[in-house]
Amino acid sequence: HLSNGNFSPVGTVASSLVGLGASGGILYGLDSSGRLVTINPTTAAVTVVGNTGLGNTGPTANVFASLTTGALFAVDNSWGLWSINPATAAATAIGAIEVNNTLFPARGSYGFSDSLAGDANYLYFTLDLWTTTPGDVLASKLYRVNPATGAATVIGPTGQEDVAGSAFADGTL
C-alpha cells in the first residue's frame, strides 16, 4: 500500500518474470522464456498472450516495462530496445540504447543489473556493469530513454549498486 508500505501477496506467479507493465487496464508480464503474459491482479493467474521471440535463443529480454500510455517495451541482453504488441506479443526492434551515439559496453562476461520503468513520455533505464577485478566497468546510472529511437540521456548516478527493479508510484520514480 503506497500510504504505509504494507504489502499483501495475492498469489504466486509460476514463471520467472523480467518485469511488469500495464496496457488498457491489463497487467502484463514478460517471462524469462520470452512469453508475454497477462496476470490477474486478484488471483495472480497467468494467461499466455504469445511468444515475443525474446527468450532463450537470440536476443533475450533482461527487463520489461510500460509507459503510462500502455505501450510495452523490453531491453535485451545487448541493450537493444524492443516494443511489444500487447495483443499479439510481436516484438519490434527499435534500436540500441545509446548515449550520444555511443553504445554501452558489450555485456560479455560482465556481471550486470538493470531496471526499466516508464512515465507518459520516456523510459527510465538503470544499468550497472562489473567484473570481480578491477570492479565497476560502468557504475550504476539512471538514463532517460526516448522510446521511439533508443537514444538515452544520462540523468546521473543512482547511488546504489545492483538496482534490479524500478517503477513509478504517484508520479515518482
Image (tube, grey):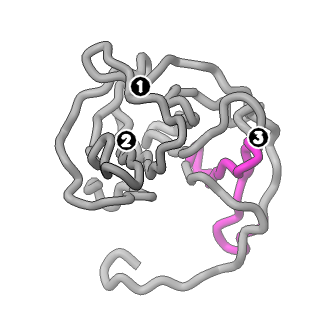
Task: Identify which residue is drawn at 55% across, 49% down.
Answer: 21
Q: Are the two marked residues, 2 and 3, in contact with CB atoms closer than 8 angstroms? A: no
Judge whether residue 29 is colored magenta. Answer: yes
**Distance from label 3 to label 1 (Cα)?**
21 Å
Asked if the residue at tag 1 contacts the one at tag 2, i.e. Cβ–Cβ closer than 8 Å, the answer is yes
* Residue type at the position of mark 1: Ile
Compute the Cα span from label 2 to label 3. 22 Å
* 86 sits left or right of 81 in the view: right
Q: Secondary structure at mark 2?
A: strand
Q: Position of residue 18 (x, y in %)?
A: 60, 52
- Mark nearest the camera among 2 and 3 is 3
Q: Secondary structure at mark 1?
A: loop
Front-most of 74 and 170?
74
> What residue is drawn where x is 38% and y is 48%?
130
Rendering quarter of residue 90: top right
Q: Calculate the distance from the C-alpha at mark 2 to the C-alpha at mark 1.
A: 9 Å
Q: Earlier in the sequence, mark 2 or mark 1?
A: 1
Q: Give the residues drawn in magenta, as a range.
A: 22-45
Amino acid marked by disc 2: Phe
Closer to the eye: label 3 or 1: 3
In this image, 31 relative to 135: left or right? right
Q: Residue at x 78, y 60 (%)?
A: 46
Is residue 73 at least partly visible in the picture?
no
- Toward which corner of the image does residue 162 lie, by quadrant? bottom left
Task: Say left or right for 161 vs 116.
Answer: left
Identify residue type, mark 3.
Answer: Asn
Q: Please name the residue shown 64% across and 50% down the image.
A: 28
Which numbered tag is attached to residue 125? 2
- Give the labeled residue for mark 1: 97
Q: Which residue is mark 3?
A: 56
Q: Residues within 10 Å of mark 1 (few under 14, many from 20)?
A: many
The 10 Å Cα crowd at callout 3, few under 14, some 14 to 19, many 20 or more, is few
